[in-house]
Image (cartoon, helix red, strand yellow):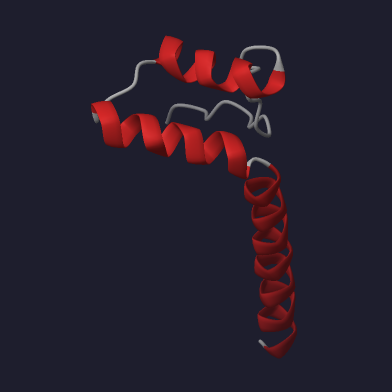
Amino acid sequence: AVEIDKQTRQLVGAAHARAHTILTGHRPVLDRIAEALLEREVLDGEEVNRIVADFTGGPIEKLKGPQRPARAEA
C-alpha cells in the first residue's frame, strides 16, 4: 500500500507540473479568452479559434488524447 501511495503521489505530481507548464505557457491567450467571456459570456468555437489564431497564427489543432480500445458489449 505504501508503494502504491508513493507512485500515486508521483503521478499526480507529474500531471500537476505538466498542467501548470501548459497553462503558464498559454497564459496570454487564456487571459484574452477570459476577457472575451466577461464581455459576451458565451463564445462559439469560431470565436475561440479567432482569438487563438491572433496569438499563434493559426487555429486550434484538434486535440488527441490517448486512444482507448473499444469496450466489448456484454
Compare residues 13 and 24 and report the one nearer the observer.
24
Kindly identify the residue that appears in the image at 67 percent across and 29 percent down.
Answer: 67
Compare residues 63 and 55 and report the one nearer the observer.
55
**Residue 12 percent across, percent down from the top left:** 65, 67
Kindly identify the residue that appears in the image at 44 percent across and 26 percent down.
Answer: 73
Residue 10, quarter of the rendered image: bottom right
Question: Looking at the image, which residue sits at the far left?
Answer: 41
Query: On screen, 3 above or below 61?
Result: below
Quadrant the N terminus occupies? bottom right
Residue 39, quarter of the rendered image: top left
**Residue 74 percent across, percent down from the top left:** 42, 31
Query: On screen, 61 above or below 67?
Result: above
Residue 20, quarter of the rendered image: bottom right
Kindly identify the residue that appears in the image at 68 percent across and 34 percent down.
Answer: 66
Compare residues 29 and 73 and report the one nearer the observer.
29
Query: On screen, 11 above or below 74?
Result: below
Query: On screen, 30 above or below 57?
Result: below
Number of callouts in the render? 0
Kindly identify the residue that appears in the image at 45 percent across and 32 percent down.
Answer: 33
